[in-house]
Image: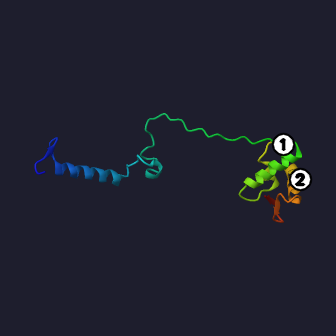
Amino acid sequence: MEGTTFRGLEVNELGSLLVGSIHGVQRRMLVDFQRPAYQDPKGAVMADLGLDVAAPTVAVAAKPACPERLAERATAVRQVLLLADRPLSAEQVARSFTGVRAATVDEVLEMLVIMGQARQVGEDVVAYAA
């Protein structure tokens, strides 16, 4: 391999330049091709690339209307309790629907407790869980 050249550089010199170049890029932390958020969390390197990219739109689910019939309302309220990761107050359950007051939801919650479909948690602060 002695004396082999590539574009005027000896092979050993070329290898040293490549390794030095790679280490230089890594030392400057400009390697951002795999995970830009991890590689460059402050966005200093990739802040402005001159690209006109729109932010992705996020679909927001609309709140359902509270059912008018009592049986359907009880089923909907119980479903909210089942999906909750913690006990909820009547006000919190009411915020899951449009067009319903907390007092109306509280009556449904009390009915669900009597029927054994929900349980009341707490004495001072009343919350319900399924």
Residue drawn at x 75%, y 42% as measured from the top left: 63
Kindly identify the amino acid type of the residue bearing the numbered disc 1. Answer: Pro
Asked if residue 59 can be seen in this view, the reply is yes
Kindly identify the amino acid type of the residue bearing the numbered disc 2. Answer: Glu
Q: Which residue is mark 2?
A: 107
What colouring does the structure picture have? rainbow
Q: Quadrant of the C terminus?
A: bottom right
Q: Secondary structure at mark 2?
A: helix
Residue drawn at x 46%, y 35% as measured from the top left: 51
Quadrant housing residue 61: top right
- Residue 75 in the image: state x and y as whole percent: 82, 49
Q: Secondary structure at mark 1?
A: loop
Residue drawn at x 13%, y 51% as measured from the top left: 1
Task: Name the mark on residue 20.
Answer: none
Residue 85 vertical position relative to residue 35 in the rendered view, above or below? below
Quadrant housing residue 60: top right
Side (left or right) of 56 relative to 33:
right
Relative depth, front residue between 91 and 78: 78
Residue drawn at x 89%, y 55% as measured from the top left: 111
Side (left or right) of 112 relative to 84:
right
